[in-house]
Structure formats: structure tokens, C-alpha cells
Amino acid sequence: MSAPDAVPVIRLWQVVKTYGQGDAAVHALRGVSLSVHEGDYVAIMGASGSGKSTLMSILGCLDVQTSGRYLLDGIDVETLDDDELAEIRNRKIGFVFQSFNLLSGSTALQNVELPLTYARVRPGERRRRAGAALEAVGLAQRLHHRPAAMSGGERQRVAVARAIAVNPSLILADEPTGNLDSVATADVLRIFASLNSEGRTIVLITHENEVAQHAKRVVRVKDGRIVDDARQAPIVGPPPMPAHLPYAPAEASA
């Protein structure tokens, strides 16, 4: 965990998000302020329509606030152009979605290689890093399987491997266990615990208390506002996965 005076990975100040105008306006976020430091593990909870998904979209630079400020690693996101935002999404943030978002015609290895391709990592290094990421989530024997030949839990582990392959400082997970059974959920939460123990910052959205109990901090959102922000002792689950990703600096092509 970073020292309290360190620059937060995430810093939101009085963020407002409004869709539409006049009587048809929807106030998704109403003055949200939030800081998340390096190495934290935060669960964001709230009912449908509470604003948590809008908040996650803004954190992931997939949407912009109507007013207020968002600093990511000390950088004011609003000052960045589209290319710079795309670069940040690809290099600083790893996304994990409930629906996996895998390419059905590509193998697990090819799916994990995709963000590394966007990052212009050379083919040999790309394959090495994608293979290491899949090994870290327990799929070393499934590199050449396509999503249709894998279980839901395996597909989500491929999605996690894809998220961590670029060695991001921040992992954003939107209902990552929503489509999984209890066994696959435990596997994914074990991976998140392992990644967090290695220093990665994790922010996940969940509606399940059982999932939120694995985080170090629970932020509750209601009607576009944060109504509770509490630290907790996370549930001690299965031992962290032993694999450590042998990352080296990305070798981009000229």
C-alpha cells in the first residue's frame, strides 16, 4: 500500500454526470469524490440505477464527466485527446467484463495477445507475455482452445489474463463473477487476491456481498452519491496462485 501522502492512482473531485437536458435529464452522478491509492482493492456496490456503472465508465476513461475533475496517476483526464485516452486505456488500465468480451474465432492465446498488438509489442515478446499471463491464471494447457470449447470460468480467466498482459497499474472489473458459478467465482477471486498481493490496484463493481467481502474497502453508491466508504478485513480465501508474471518492459516495434 502506498503512503497516505502519495499521489492517488484515482482521484475524483465533485464529479457530476448528467445525461440529457431539462425535464428529461438523468443525473447519474451527483458530486462524487473518491481517492484510490496504489495497491488498494475496492469493491463498488449499489442497486441498479445507482450510478456505479457510470462511475466505472468514467474511471476507465470510456466516458467523461459533465463537471468536476478526474485525475488518473495525477494526470487530469480532461486534458487528454482521443489518442492519449486510448493509450492510457491500453497501457494503464486492464478491463474485465461480466460478458468476457472475447473474440469467438480466436484462441485463448490470440485473445490475450490482442491488447499487446495494440501496444505495438513485437510478436515474440507478445506471445511470451500472453502465455505467461495465461499460465498465471491456471490456463497453461488451454492456450490454443477457443472460447466455445471453454467453460464460463475458463473464459473469465482468459479475460483476466488479457487484462493483466499489458502489466497495467489498475484493473477495473465490472461484475466479473456475475455469470459464474460458485467454484469459478472462487477461482477468479483467488486470482484477484493474488494480483492485489503483488501490488496491483483493483476496483470492481459487484452486487454480491459475498464478492465484496474479498475486497479491502467497500464503497456504496446510491442515487448517484457515495453513501458509505468503509475499510474491512478481507475474507481469507484460497492461497494466492503461485505464478508470478515474468514481465519485462514492452518491446515496441519501430
Image (tube, rainbow, N blue to C red):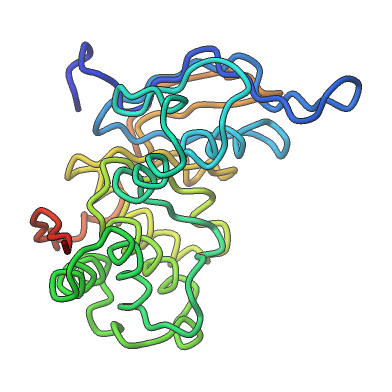
| Front residue of 156 and 93 | 93
Q: Position of residue 196 (x, y in %)?
A: 25, 43
How many marks on residues? 0
Q: Position of residue 246 (x, y in %)?
A: 9, 61
Q: Residue furthest right?
A: 23
Considering only vertical position in the picture, is 113 above or below 59?
A: below
Quadrant of the rendered image containing residue 124: bottom left
Q: Position of residue 177 (x, y in %)?
A: 50, 57
- Residue at point 66%, 23% (across, down): 224
User: Horizontally, is 207 left or right of 192 in the view?
Assistant: right
Considering only vertical position in the picture, is 232 above or below 196?
A: above
- Residue at point 35%, 32% (across, down): 216
Considering only vertical position in the picture, is 128 above or below 244?
A: below
- Residue at point 22%, 14% (across, down): 4
User: Horizontally, is 202 left or right of 69 in the view?
Assistant: left
Q: Residue furthest front?
A: 254
Q: Position of residue 252 (x, y in %)?
A: 17, 60
| Front residue of 159 and 116 | 116
User: Horizontally, is 215 left or right of 7 in the view?
Assistant: right
- Residue at point 29%, 48% (across, down): 91
Q: Which quadrant would the N terminus be assigned to in this image?
A: top left
Q: Which quadrant would the C terminus be assigned to in this image?
A: bottom left
